[in-house]
Amino acid sequence: MFRIMFNTAFIQRGNYIKAGKMELSPEDIRKDKNKQIPADFIVYIFFEDFCSICNPYETEIEDLCDRCKNEIGEATLKEWIDVKKIMSEHDFPAEETARRLLPNVDPELMRTTLETPL
């Protein structure tokens, strides 16, 4: 019926991905003028938890269980730790600087985005 590719980073809390007609492939599905697939078509893909010990939203990289560390692999874990270090050392712009860099962004959206912890 269709193909869908996604980055696992887009799996939402609750272990699912939601894709509408515009996220599907091939292109003719998006251009069928609602003849076969309605405009409000949505597909949900649900995933089972891989591990009952580690929580992807709360468990620190260093605290992952041996099964998760083994599955992820040493090289990827090292990359994640490097990225985490870079992010923790990065100076994020203050709201005033952000307004100058992104003048057309809604101020409320910018404020809440800057306040959201990574």
Image (spheres, rainbow, N blue to C red):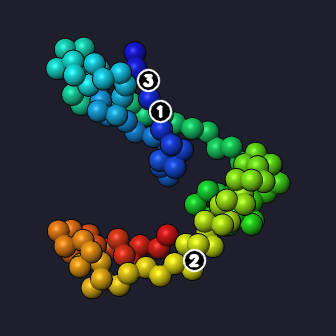
Measured as percent of width and height from the top left, residue 116 is found at: 41, 73
Residue 49's image quarter? top right
Q: Indicate which disc, 2 or 3, sits on the residue closer to the N terminus.
A: 3
Rendered view: 58 above or below 32: below
Q: Is residue 17 visible?
A: yes
Q: Residue at x 28, y 18 (%)?
A: 28
Residue 58's image quarter? bottom right
Measured as percent of width and height from the top left, residue 9 is found at: 52, 49
| Residues under numbered marks 1 and 2 in contact, where contact means CB atoms less than 8 Å apart | no
Q: Which residue is mark 2?
A: 88
| Other-residue count near label 2 (Cα within 10 Å), few / some / many at <14 / 14–19 / ≥20 | few
Mark linked to residue 29:
none
Report the side of 79 relative to 57 (left or right): right
Q: Secondary structure at mark 2?
A: helix
Task: Residue type at mark 1: give it.
Answer: Met
Rendered view: 5 above or below 75: above
| Residues under numbered marks 3 and 1 in contact, where contact means CB atoms less than 8 Å apart | yes
Q: Is residue 38 visible?
A: no
Mark linked to residue 3:
3
Mark linked to residue 5:
1
Q: How many marks?
A: 3
| Other-residue count near label 3 (Cα within 10 Å), few / some / many at <14 / 14–19 / ≥20 | few
Query: Where is the N terminus found, in terms of image quarters?
Result: top left
The front one of 73 and 17 is 73
Q: Indicate which disc, 1 or 2, sits on the residue closer to the N terminus.
A: 1
Q: Separation of disc 3 and disc 1 at Cα?
A: 7 Å
